[in-house]
Amino acid sequence: MDLSQWSLDEKIGQLFICGFHSLTADEQIRTLVKDYHVGGTVYFRRNVESVSQLAALSANLQRLPRSRPEIPLFISIDQEGGMVSRLDHEGMSRIPGNMTLGAAGDLRLTRRAAELAAKEMIALGINFNFAPCVDVNNNPANPVIGVRSFGEDPDKVGEHGAAAIHGYQQSGVIATAKHFPGHGDTTVDSHRGLAVVPHDRRRLERIELAPFAKAIAAGVDAIMTAHVAFPAFEPDEGTPATLSKRVLTDLLRVDLGFEGVIVTDCLEMHAISKSCGIAEGAVRAIEAGADLILVSHTFEDQIAAIRAVREAVASGRLSEERIDRSSERVLALKKKRIGWLPPVAETESFVPVPLTPPEESDALLTEIAEHSVTLVKDAENLPLDPAEAILVVWPELRHRTEVDEPAVHRYTLADALGRYGERITLSVIGTHPTEREVEEVLNQSRNFAQIVVVTYTAEGELPTGQAQLVQGLNRLYGSRIVAVSSRNPYDLHDFPEVGTYLCLYENRSFALDALAKVLTGKIVPRGTLPVSLDSEYRTGFRLL
């Protein structure tokens, strides 16, 4: 595109994606678009209330006054599915997460899930998805990736990633492979600090980089950077990939041949904001080779970052030619996937609720869920005896964290089992249960011959209270206990003596319905482990 008639400020603005905090186009995003020419925004749950509200918000954002109204805004979102879902409100399909798809092991299903997600995003006015995550999760202690990964086998991760990329992009949504060059083998959450992956280049090429190579071969539109240090690529200690020219330009552009758009992870994450700072981070990321700078939350930081880039050009630290190269990539991607905007009428467009008729979506989501439930071990507790009452222990997520958001809808395993007429008693604990909660469940359990305890781990290690509860039940009842991990499959490490162990990879409704069918003998478990739990239970294992 000819940028000769564009101002420097307009070109710099196209390099920024900024979030805001409202259900409507508030003053923050209006100012960013009108006065600072930002090229896009990013949605979080804070921006989502309903199908009609979100579709109207997207339309109104594209109508915002700006110097070049024909150039569309990127309207982006982290809609990975499963446990990272901003879109799971009434009328929106409950898209499964990556590890669920990895356990199901069918590339056709992965692609169809992405197509369904993309179709609904387009209806909501969303054109840019920060997915799929193609990190290889080979570290059980990883506090931030976990079930966001397809698994620990780099070939399978790459294959599923490519299937998802095709599903998104052929349906009109920009796909993003993340987090380059790989966030799977870390023990630090980059929201909170700088993680380091210390392996040599040969190992990194074989494991971490392999899925990104497949994503590039699949024609992925965008790649998101990791705020993670890789000494094998960047010897300057403490420099994360996001700020490294050796990683973004030498490795990603030159060695891997990526010609698309490089987008940073949010610069407000502590790995950047608590080191060099957000404004300086924006300049350094562009110096390194990034095209799009993501600043998701704070208005003052967004303005400071844009101004810092402008000042870097004025001082000669960044050349205007460097800004032009990224602006051209950004505009080319907008034209390819979105097109230039015609004058937008003020009339409301009709958006169906639900976005996809259940007869179209439910069969797919049910098939994926039923192919993903993984039976690891069983001491002849399954199927459950319908003549005996069942105690279901359910961990309830009560607090939002960087890697965890409570679901909009409350649906438990007891709800799913109740559809089959069993006599169910539900005992609800927090995901970080107190000693009193643990003791109350242990006392309550004495009235039941069948006990199903669900566990939930979000940040690398099973919370102490949950581990103590399962261990206490095992001491009381031996191999009679049925334990189900509802997110992190590694929970077995804390209670290896449990009699029966199954893995779900999310606690959403379709997964729980599939689990209920397995527990009651209506279907056989068909999922395989996408990660290794130990030397006995390795990737690809299933009991039946």
Image: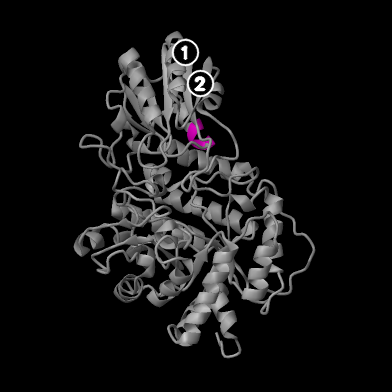
Q: Earlier in the sequence, mark 1 or mark 2?
A: 2
With 299 as the anchor, is 27 left or right in this view? right
Instruction: Quadrant for the C terminus, please.
Output: top left
Q: Quadrant of residue 304?
A: bottom right
Can residue 341 be seen by looking at this rendering? yes
* Tag 1: amino acid: Gln
Amino acid type of the residue tagged 2 in the rendering: Ser
Dominant secondary structure, magenta: helix
- 451 or 142: nearer the eye? 142
Give the number of the disc on residue 479: none
Residue extent of the magenta highlight: 509-513
Q: Position of residue 103 (x, y in %)?
A: 37, 42
Q: Residue at x 52, y 20 (%)?
A: 426
Q: Position of residue 416 (x, y in %)?
A: 53, 27
> Of residues 161 and 238, which is closer to you in this image?
238
Secondary structure under tag 2 reads strand
Badge 2: how crowded within 10 Å, few (<14), some, or many (20+)? Answer: some
Q: Where residue 456 appears, x then y in whole percent?
A: 43, 34
Distance in Å between CA atoms under marks 1 and 2:
9 Å
Rendered residue at 40%/77% (across/down) = 287
The circle on residue 427 is: 2
Which residue lies most toward the right here? 347
Does the segment drawn in magenta span residue 511? yes
The residue that disc 1 covers is 444
| Up/down of 21 relative to 527, above or below | below
Q: Quadrant of the N terminus?
A: bottom right
Q: Residue at x 42, y 15 (%)?
A: 442
Callout 1–callout 2 Cβ contact below 8 Å = yes
Question: Above or below — where is 74 with respect to 478?
Answer: below
- 283 versus 386 height, above or below: below
Q: Quadrant of residue 281?
A: bottom left
